Structures are given as structure tokens and as C-alpha cells.
Amino acid sequence: MGQNRPMGEQGFRLHLRAMVLLLAAVPLLLAIAAVVWVVRQQSDRLAQAQIAAMQPILLQARKDELQHFVQIGRRAVARLYEQTGHDPQARQQALELLRRMDFGNDNYFFVYDLQGNSLMHPRLPDLEGHSQWELRDSAGAPIIQQLVRQAQAGGGFVDYMWNRPSTGRDERKLGYVELVPEWGWVMGTGLYLDHLQETQALITRSTAQAVQQTRQQILLIASAALLLVAGGGLALNLYEQRAADTKLRAMAQKVVHSQEDERSRVARELHDGISQQLLSVKFVAESALLQLERGNADAAPTLRQGVAMLQGLVRDVRRISHDLRPTLLDDVGLASALAQIAREFGERSGIQVETQVASLPPIPEAVATAVFRVAQEALGNIEKHAGAQHVQLQLSYGDSGLALQLRDDGAGLDVPATLRQARSGLGLTNMRERIEMLGGSFSLASAPGATLLRAHMPGAVLKA
């Protein structure tokens, strides 16, 4: 009996410990399951919302692209008509010009007369010279009749089914037509709308991958948590709190790095996504080349238009790339990058900018990025909201660390109220978090006629 009691107490303690662990683990597992379910539901909703938001934008972009292409073709035809009038040879030249203005295997110009006769079709030349008035698509809609009526009504878009040359299948196509009244033509082009389904599928796949990755991360965290519960119980001491704070800070830094990496990726995608504008330049260049080949001395306006479009394209690429990822920050460092954005700010806004930027030793990339983004956001706020006439930007470096100061003589703002409104649109919360996340300090003082923003990074942070 004397030996049974200790064994009974030991068994009771083991049972109690198991019960405590069970009571700690079961709610945790239920919470993880609930989180996984919520993540899945929210991800599905987000995907549907993205699809609903992107489809009208993409469709409008395609419409603008079609309208732009047809207008380029109309201008090319108009020049020939102005030079030759109703000359039949000029009409044939115009048709050949449109036949050559090709922008992809499945995208081309077509021309019909008002009676539905095909005058030019680069993919289906057998149709040329024959009436297509009674042609209907797989849904029974009279395609050519709709195109002619839309052109006579002032031009516009027609949605119909058409055989796709690259696949040989009937697919949904969006066409845009305009009337060429000089020669009684219906001229147009079209784009297949499969990109809408591709975009939807891409968003769905990306969401599924994100959900799968999130689920794996949640399960990994849950496994680690269960091990901690089994090893140390439910008690959290000061050491664990400090460790959690350290992990949170590291996670926040990782988020900032991820944001910057994403900006770089998006910058490259936007750079590659300007192909539509490049196609427009290509059409203008081809039109000018055709004029030069025919001995037309009036190609200079067309070339000037192409050069102007190229200049605008270069400016857009530089602006987008600079906004999303400052290459100067990587190439020449923080000091030169700040001087550059201050100079561009002054040229763009007309506000007088006084810049004092000290030479800097090598500093951590995260610190340079944070200080640069704070200065960039602050200058943007001044331009949008302050109504200032003069701005002072100062970057100093010393034994105490790195300090950024921006002072303007604008209208000022109510600092406490602004900081309380996390979504006020001024980005103050974001600026403060960027600096404090790295161990720095952020302050803002304002009154009518004087606003001072200061960000300071201690020397210990710069040496980390």
C-alpha cells in the first residue's frame, strides 16, 4: 500500500499534465483550423473581387487599343485620299497599306463596302471580292450587317464569334469599325477576348498557390506551437515575450524587404507591358516608311509624331521604374538619390527646394531604403497638401547617427489628429513604422507656415 500511493500520485500528475496539454492543444488546433478556413474563404473572395475589378479595366484597355489602331489606319488612308482623290489605283494602294499594317497572327485590318462585299482580308483572301452580307456567326448573329450598321452609326464596337486563324476555332472577338466616307468603306480591326479568361485563370491559380503556401505556413507554426506547448506548457515568461518581440521586428523587416522586391518585379513588368505603345510607334514608322518608299516628301510630320511618341514612352518608362524602385539608390547611394528626387520635385512642382546632403559612408540597405522612402513620401505630401513655396531638405551624418529633416512653409496640419487617422492618406503612419521598425525615431511638428519632419537613425543601427 505504501508503494501504491506514490505511483497513484505520479499517475495522477501525468494524467493532469496530459489534460493540461490537451486543453492547451485542442483550442489551438481548433483555432488553426478556423484560421485556415477563414484564409480560404477570404482568398476566394479576394480572387473574385480581383477578377471583377480587372475585367472591366482589361476590356476598356482593349477597346482603347482597337480604337487607336483604327485611327492610325484612318489617318494613313486619309493621306492617300487627300493626295489622289478617287483614283482607283490609290484605293488599291490604301488596301495594300492596310494589309501590311499587321500586329500579330490573329490581329489585322479588314475592309468591306456598304453592301457587305469583302475588299481586303489578309487572313482570308478568298473572301475578297465576294459578298458576306448574309454571313452569320455560330450564335446566328449577322456579323457583316452589324459591322456595317455600327460604322454607319458613327463607328463603334461589335462583339461576335469569328474563326481564329491560329487555332481554327470560333472564338469570341471584339471588333471596332469606322466608316471611310470618301470611298464608302467600312474599315476595322478586332482582338480576341481570350485574355479575359486567361487573366481569371491566372488569378485563380495565384490564389490557390497563395492559399496552399499559407496553409503550409500555418501548419508549420501550429506544429512549432504544439512542440512548445508540450515542452514548456502554457506559461509565457519575460524571455518569451522578448523573443516574440524580436521575431516580430524581424518579420516586419522581412515584410519591408518583400515589398521592395515586389516593387522591383512590378517595375520590370510595367516596363515589358508597354508593348501596346510600342506597336503604335511601329505603325507610325511603317506608315512613314511607306510614304518614303513611294517618294512622298510629306513623311516628316509622321516621323515627328513617332519621335514624340517615343519620347513620351521613354519618359513613362523612366518615371514608372523610378517610382517603383529607385535605381539611383542602388547605383550611387542614398545621398545622390535624395538630391535627385529633390531636384525632380522642384522641377515638377515649381516649389523652391534647398538641399543640404552630406557625404555618407556605406550604410545598410534597409536603412537607406527606409530613409529614401520617407523623403519620397514627405515630398509627395508637400506637393499634394501643403501649398508650400519653399522646402528645405537636409541629410546629416555624425557620431549620433543619420538624420533626415524636411521643412516647408505650407499650411501645416493638426499632427495629433492626423496620426490618429491611420487612413488619412498622408502616409505618416507608414513613415513612422518604416523608421521605428529599424530602431530609429520619427517626429513631426507643424504649425501654419512651418512644418518640420525629422527621422533619425542611431549609429548602432547603421553598424548593425
Image (cartoon, helix red, strand yellow):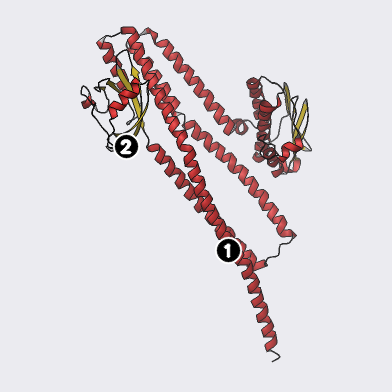
At label 1, which amino acid type do we have?
Answer: Leu
Q: Quadrant of residue 416?
A: top right
Identify the secondary structure beneath mark 1: helix
Q: Which residue is mark 2?
A: 171
Evaluate whether residue 251 shows in this view. Answer: yes
Of the pair 339 and 270, the residue shown nearer to us: 270
**Measured Cα–Cα span from mark 2 to mark 1:** 49 Å
Displayed quadrant of residue 79? top left
Of badges 2 and 1, nearer the viewer stands 2
Percent of width and height locating residue 362: 68, 36
Quadrant of the image containing the C terminus: top right
Query: In the rendered view of the protein, which quadrant contains the N terminus?
Result: bottom right
- Name which residue lies at 25% across and 23% down: 116
Residue 181 to residue 263: above or below: above
Q: Is residue 383 left or right of residue 274?
A: right
Q: Which mark is residue 29?
A: 1
Asked whether residue 464 appears in the rendered view, the answer is no
- In the image, residue 5 sits, relative to residue 290, either above or below, namely below
Percent x, y for residue 251?
A: 63, 49
Please name whichever residue, 415 or 211, is drawn nearer the observer in this view of the structure: 415
Q: Is residue 29 above or below residue 327?
A: below
Left or right for 240, reference 46: right
Residue in the picture at 49% in, 23% down: 313
Q: Amino acid at mark 2?
A: Glu
- Left/right placement of residue 19 relative to residue 57 reads right
Q: What residue appears at the point 32 percent right and 37 percent down from the top-left corner?
A: 171
Residue 140 marker: none
Element at label 2: strand
Q: Locate residue 460, reporting x and y percent.
A: 75, 43
- Specify few, some or many for label 2: CA neighbours under 10 Å numbering under 14, 14-19, or 20 or more: some
